[in-house]
Amino acid sequence: MYCKKVFLFASAISLFFISCSNDDSSTTEAPIGAYENGVLILNQGNFGTDNSSVSFLSNNFSVFENNSFGIVNPTEVLGDTGQDIGFYNDLAFIVLNNSQKIEVVNRKTLAHVTSIETGLSNPRYIAFSQGKGYITNWGDGGNPNDDYVAVINLQNYTVLRTIPVNEGPERIIVNNNKLYVAHQGGYNFGNTVTVIDANSNTVSESINVGDVPNSLKIQNDILYVLCGGKPSWSGTETAGILVKHDLTSNTSTSLDFATSSHPSNLYLSEGMVYYTDNSDVYSMSATAAALPSTPLFSTFDQGVYGVYSFAVENGRIFVGDAVDYSSNGKVYIYSTNGILEYEFTVGVIPAGFYFN
């Protein structure tokens, strides 16, 4: 079901209202600054510029707004290359990779609280445990030995210490006071997941997985790690692999993709595993013993030639399309049966969905 009407409400806050049902043309106006009960879409922007932005979409899809951070904070610049958003209590921490900073805002109003601008070097992703923030950092791209996880004091927003890790720390998640860091490899190709004890802030172990682990999730004490494999242009192409690591027994099983398949964007929802491969979206039971042979659906009909960002929430699939990587991107929302329901134009390079 496609959106039939898009109205531009020409006010100072530039809100877009969307009606996407067959006959209902009613719209709902959200109070200014009410950014809870919806999804924040982080638009990465162009590397080397300060055009990162945040879009907002309400849970019922009736209210949509671009440049929400800029509207709320007209004297603040969000920054260069929006990478990730993490929520902690009433705050949202927006990681700006090429600005070397974290912008801290109220998660409900998006009002600026503070900026963390010291102790970071190519910051990537953020997680929280034991009242502290943990941010993966690539360090200097030319130095494979200076990568680390920064530990943030959430009371005064300073870096308490750094934890040295292998090259290219990327996605980071938390389970039972342990942090799991996927080493996608930065400017090279990684194949491990580092485990950090949040009580001692030390590395406790390293888990071998496949080449280029790009996404990871935990469900029922099983760590799921999706590895894309080395691409053909590397000269040593390897197959993608889905690793399931039992955190209780510390044992792993895996499902192998074809060598030419390089999956990404792992997501778990309601007992199902979702991932993408180029324009295709796949799903399977979390307990399945084999990978699906055919996709759930393809985004190719919408002109998506590679899913850039991805999420599954409340029975819907969210797809971000970077389009040409320089102009405004697109967000498509599908049912879990693959039926397109909504389409929105967002900022440059929609990089992630964060449900508030």
Image (cartoon, rainbow, N blue to C red):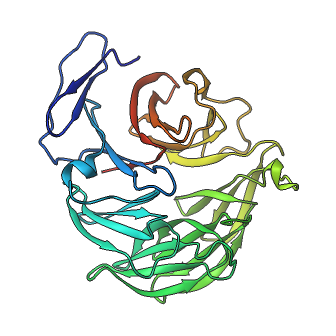
How many numbered marks have been drawn onto this rendered protein structure? 0
Residue at point 58%, 70% (across, down): 181
> Does the rendering let one see residue 317?
no
Up the image or down, 199 lies above or below 324; here it is below
Nearer to us in this view, 210 or 8: 8
- Looking at the rendered image, the quarter that the N terminus falls into is top left
Which percent across, then down, holds residue 278? 67, 37
Q: In the displayed image of the protein, which residue is found farthest to the top? A: 23
Q: Position of residue 130 (x, y in %)?
A: 37, 79
Q: Quadrant of residue 199?
A: bottom left
Q: Is residue 41 left or right of residue 288?
A: left
Q: Nearer the viewer, residue 292 or 97?
A: 97
The residue depicted at 47 percent of the width and 69 percent of the height is 174
Q: Who's the residue at 30% across and 45% down the image?
A: 67
Q: Is residue 174 visible?
A: yes
The answer to whether residue 196 is left or right of residue 263 is: left
Q: Is residue 335 left or right of residue 8?
A: right
Say if 236 sits above or below 324 in the image: below
Q: Position of residue 325 (x, y in %)?
A: 54, 41
Which image quarter: residue 142? bottom right
Residue 47 placed where, x, y %?
52, 55
Q: Quadrant of residue 20?
A: top left
Q: Is residue 32 above or below residue 19?
A: below
Would you say 168 lies left or right of 51 here?
right
The residue at the far left in this view is 31
Residue at coordinates 83% horizontally, 48% vertically from top-left? Answer: 232
Q: Residue furthest right?
A: 235
